[in-house]
Amino acid sequence: MKQKYQELNINRDFSDILSTYLNFIKWNIVGFTKGYLKNAGLLIITLILASYFITTGVMELIAIESSSNFGTNSSDSYLFSIGIGGLLFFIIIISMGIYNYGLSSLYLIKYDTNKDGEINFREVITFLKPEFGKLFLFLLTLIPLMLIGGFISVAVSFIPLFGIFVNYFIQFLMTAWFGISVYALLKEDLGIFKALGKGWKLVTGQFWKCIGINAVIGFITGVLLIAAMIIPGILLGVYTYHVVESEIVYSTSIIARIVYSFGVVLFVLMAVFTQCLGQFANGMLYHTLTEAKENNYTRAKIDQIGTFRD
């Protein structure tokens, strides 16, 4: 697919980064979405199974508890269903994290490499496959960092107003740090801790620009997520109202299980896809911050001018 191209390796200000990001999304969203869904088939099927297990278990447990039969062998079997669904859900979230970080980062790397050439999605997938192990270890490394951030967020959440700002601050800081670090991991083929170190240096070098960009992009993708879920949410609400009014035993209804399962699947897919779109912004931040620090692109252009004059 032929791409329009904007040079990424330029020291841009806040508004220019947003403009570059929005143009990139406008030019690439259709092709990227097609490739994303086409290659995520196995993940989506596993997510459907996980959602069905969890939905079935939760619905049956609610029915059993309301009938005072909680603790019976029947309830234990549905606890097992929730456990299986939860395990599958954990695996699928880790897998989608690898897929999202890797796919969006490598797509942008390919975009930068090809300039105004074609982006072959199969090549992006080919580059992604050998990086799965490294990305998996990278995500495992992020877990204790996220737990620390979560602990701080909980600790300050009891402080009125101030706690809200701190929570958002930590969220956007970690999003920027992790996103830029994983981009450096793949683009420069760094080790995990070197990538996290470089990401931290780049983020702290232009701190408020990174926080601000991630705040604005987070708001945009959040609005997109809400907009995309309005119609499914209304339909799910209407169906629930119909179930309650008709006194249908939803805990034993196959249709109810399928409907609620697909509701969960749709929400999770939209949430992880918007995170994938947000990673493009952090990739662009990597290029901007690296150029601001090293001036490689500017120096190359100056050298070209000198060669031309000679």
Image (cartoon, helix red, strand yellow):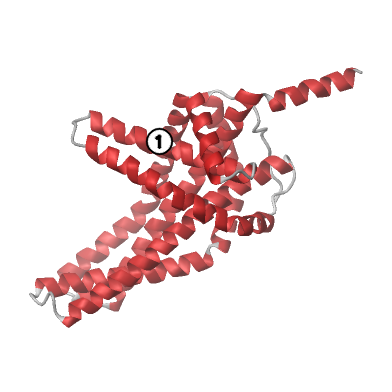
Residue 269, quarter of the rendered image? bottom left
Judge whether residue 256 can be spotted in this image.
no
Label 1 crowd (10 A; few <14 / some 14-19 / many >=20): many
Q: Which residue is mark 1?
A: 172
What is the secondary structure assignment of the residue under circle 1? Answer: helix
Question: Does residue 19 appear left or right of residue 66 in this picture?
Answer: right
Query: Type of residue at label 1?
Result: Phe
- Tally of numbered tags: 1
In the image, residue 114 sits, relative to residue 212, either above or below, namely below
Q: Residue at x 24, y 68 (%)?
A: 58
Q: Is residue 203 above or below residue 67?
A: above
Q: Is residue 243 above or below residue 99?
A: below
**242 versus 306 height, above or below:** below
The residue at 33%/35% (across/down) is 168
Query: Residue 34, located in which quarter of the rendered image?
Result: bottom right
Q: Quadrant of the C terminus?
A: top right
Image x and y of residue 144, in percent: 38, 47
Q: Position of residue 174 (x, y in %)?
A: 42, 38
Q: Is residue 308 left or right of residue 180?
A: right
Name of the residue lying farthest toward the right? 310
